[in-house]
Amino acid sequence: MSFQPFHNNKNKNPNFTSPPLKKTLLNSKTTESFNHMVLAMQLHSLTDPNSKTLIPNFDLTLLLSDEILLKILSKLPNSQSKSNFLVSKRWLNLQGRLIRSLKIFDLNFVLSGRLIYRFPNLTHVDLVPSTFVVHPQNGVVLITHRVVSMRVDTEWCFGFSEEVKGKNLLPVEAIDKGLKEVAKGCPNLRKLKVTGGSEEGLVSIGEECVTLMELELQKCNDDVLRGVAACKNLQVVKLIGSVDGFYESVVSDIGLTILAQGCKRLVKLELVGCEGSFDGIKAIGACCLMLEELVFVDHRMDDGWLAGVSFCENLKTLRFVSCKVIDGNPGLEEHLGYCVALESLHFQKCQLRDKNAMSAVFSVCRAAKEVVLQDCWGLDDGVFGLAVVCRRVKLFDIEGCSLLSTEGLESVIESWKDLECLRVVSCKNIKDSDISPALATLFPTLKELKWRPDTKHLLPSSLREVNMGKKGGKFFKWTHA
């Protein structure tokens, strides 16, 4: 909208200049009066069909302050946020203020300063996708591992030689620059995910983002953990060292000790593909007195490390995921100790054939009230029989363990006098026909019972009649026209 200066016909002075328009319009009272005038004219033109008032196409939300419009936008569903960005530049900027969590796919978006300009109030930032080298012209695919996922182009070689491992990552210097931009522009950052980087980049995060509470660091090593130790208020940390086929990185006792001494407020620690031994785990337990959950994923720990877990005095949950070996040589039972406060023991997709290791685990976790076993190998009656030392179990959940028999299950759960919840799913060696009268008597006393050891129990009776689900059964028949 433009305005022409008004000249009095009686005073046509060529040297006359109109007063600056900006100063007039910037007066708060004048601006308020002008807005009311425009709104009145707009409403009049809409309500009176005979009105000849000419009003240009006008965005009525301009009459609202940023604060009021932000409150309105915040009440809209998340599904509408993308369309809100397209309304106008003002809406684009305001909607960006409401975004709290963002996943970055291009690190240049961070390095150019556009991330902070567009989204100034971020609290959760995921830089992992942006740290990998991708050439879109070659086609982009998503590679997923047990613990990581990444977008790569079709020409990328999937780690078949030591020379190519890690070559798909951006240079450390570039990642550090990105971390410094995030640190500078996101003072209220609470959660960060990143791959690579160095001590320098993480130190900048620790110094600027004092509210950071959760960190996932991929391709981590001992040197990088010196920077992580600068983040004093961290409560949840996930460290990914080596991942087969993706990258090789070493987290040892040195790094674990540095982490323990720097981040003493840890509540949850997840170690993926990390090395270490008794000393590193002991340091974690001795320094991180608030630690409640400890997770090991595909660990490469030295023999005897399990004895260090007993130093985690307030540990409530111990979880093993995709571990080929629990502990190669746990040592004598009297030297293991046990976790007094432990409540939950979880195994998922682990090799549980080693009786010495399993005996040590159950001994350390003898106070557990929940035991969960999912899709584990080698769990036969002899291995599971070692769980009788866990006398306080109230919940037992087992799924996808095909070697355990009904007799082996019964021999243990009969010793669990406090058992209240039992879930048995997809364990083909546990048969209904093998249920003893003592076990059948136990079932009605439970508060919760989920008994589906054979997946064929899921089939409707109408399908069982046609032999569907039976190995080798004929369901389809040839017919001649």
Image: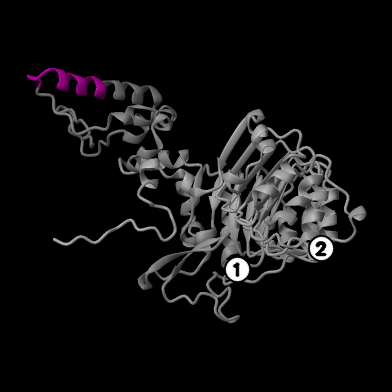
Say which residue appears at 63% left-offset and 42% top-offset.
Answer: 435
Describe residue 11's horizontal placement relative to residue 363 as left or right: left
Tell me the quarter of the image containing the N terminus: top left
Tell which of 272 and 390 is nearer to you: 390
Residue most toward the right? Answer: 334
| Residue bearing mark 1 | 173
Specify the quadrant that holds the C terminus. Answer: bottom left
Residue 39 part of the magenta segment: yes
Residue 81 horizontal/vertical position (percent): 38, 40
Viewer-closest of 403 and 16: 403
C-beta proximity under 8 Å, tags 2 and 1: no
Percent position of residue 283, x then y: 84, 54
Q: Does residue 233 appear in this view?
A: no
| Color encoding of the figure | one colour
Extent of the magenta region: 38-51
Mark nearer the N terminus (2 vs 1): 1
Distance from disc 2 to disc 1, alpha carbons, whole Å, reads 31 Å
Instruction: Choose between 340 and 47: the one closer to the eye.
Output: 340
Dominant secondary structure of the residues highlighted in magenta in the image: helix
Q: 142 or 133: which is nearer to us?
A: 142
Q: How many labels were placed on the picture?
A: 2
Residue at far left of view? 50
Choose top left, top right, bottom left or bottom right for residue 474.
Answer: bottom left
Where residue 88 sits: x, y (%)? 31, 41
Q: Which residue is mark 2?
A: 277
Q: Is residue 67 left or right of residue 317?
A: left
What's the amino acid at mark 1?
A: Glu
The kind of secondary structure element at disc 2 is loop
Badge 1 marks a residue whose secondary structure is helix
Q: Amino acid at mark 2?
A: Ser
